[in-house]
Image (cartoon, helix red, strand yellow):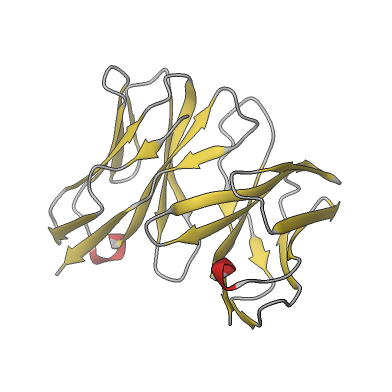
């Protein structure tokens, strides 16, 4: 089974702190994604990576950066956390190809910024 | 821009009944659609997919119908069980994007015993 793991289930940080969210997948997937999920807004794409060291901005990249130094690991960085970044963060991965590339999700990290 | 939305935010059914969850989309150039289930405290899980050149696809107790004329997608769950209680999302993969999915906002399905 595909497994996507996230470093923390719950995280509480203070405004202005630098926050790292880690994601690891074990299926040798080329693509990895970071979403945030908020009530009434659904899943919104923050960043997407299609290869090591490659990244693309999603719909809401402001205030975030990402790092992909190894194929299995995709990190989301909040340079200076703010209260409006309190949210559920979901990581996903998928293969690359001509077929249907479903995304496999991790369990999520609920981040609270106080 | 493209959008994927749902007709109803909540749906409550009795155990054993059939459930129908609807989804509207606006992008005509979609490659495929995926339905996800998200249980409380967990990440979304794949249920079933359908390519845009199909009208219907069946899985175990689930059927997805695609009506391209009215840009409508539905997920039917037969003999709904308490374990089916979750939020259900439809997601669309458009031809112009690199593996990115656009997600609907979700429908909360509650199954009453």
- Of A59 and A104, nearer the camera is A59
| Residue at x 50%, y 61% (from the top left corner) | B43
Q: Is residue A64 left or right of residue B12?
A: right
Where residue A98 sits, quadrant-wise, is: top right
| Residue at x 28%, y 17% (from the top left corner) | B69
- Of B43 and A58, nearer the camera is A58
Looking at the image, how many numbered discs can be counted on the residues?
0
Residue A52 percent location from the top left of the image? 85, 45
Where residue A58 sits, quadrant-wise, is: top right
Q: Is residue B58 above or below residue B16?
A: above
| Residue at x 63%, y 71% (from the top left corner) | A82
- Of B26 and B58, nearer the camera is B26
Q: Quadrant of the C terminus of chain B?
A: bottom left
Residue B26 percent location from the top left of the image? 38, 27
Q: Is residue A100 visible?
A: yes
Q: Is residue A89 left or right of residue A25?
A: left
Residue B85 percent location from the top left of the image? 28, 63
Q: Is residue A105 left or right of residue B80?
A: right
Where residue A8 sits, quadrant-wise, is: bottom right
| Residue at x 66%, y 53% (from the top left corner) | A62
Q: Is residue A73 visible?
A: no
Q: Is residue B29 above or below residue B40?
A: above
Residue A56 percent location from the top left of the image? 73, 41
């Amino acid at each position: 089974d595909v497994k996507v793991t996230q470093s923390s289930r719950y995280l509480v940080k203070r405004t202005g702190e630098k926050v790292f969210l880690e994601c690891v997948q074990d299926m040798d997937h080329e693509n990895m994604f970071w979403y945030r999920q908020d009530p009434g807004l659904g899943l919104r794409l923050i960043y997407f990576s299609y290869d090591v060291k490659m990244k693309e901005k999603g719909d809401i990249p402001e205030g975030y950066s990402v790092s992909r130094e190894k194929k299995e690991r995709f990190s989301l960085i909040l340079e200076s956390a703010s209260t409006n970044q309190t949210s559920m963060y979901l990581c996903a991965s998928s293969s690359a190809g001509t077929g249907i590339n479903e995304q496999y999700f991790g369990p999520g990290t609920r981040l609270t910024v106080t | 821009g493209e959008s994927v939305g749902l007709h109803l935010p909540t749906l409550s059914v009795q155990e054993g009944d059939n459930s129908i969850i609807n989804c509207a989309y606006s992008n005509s150039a979609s490659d495929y659609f995926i339905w996800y289930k998200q249980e409380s405290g967990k990440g979304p899980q794949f249920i079933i997919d359908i390519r845009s050149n199909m009208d219907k696809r069946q899985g175990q107790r689930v059927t997805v119908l695609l009506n391209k004329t009215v840009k409508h997608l539905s997920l039917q769950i037969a003999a709904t069980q308490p374990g089916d209680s979750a939020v259900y999302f439809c997601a669309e993969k458009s031809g112009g994007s690199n593996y990115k999915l656009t997600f609907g906002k979700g429908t909360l399905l509650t199954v009453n015993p």
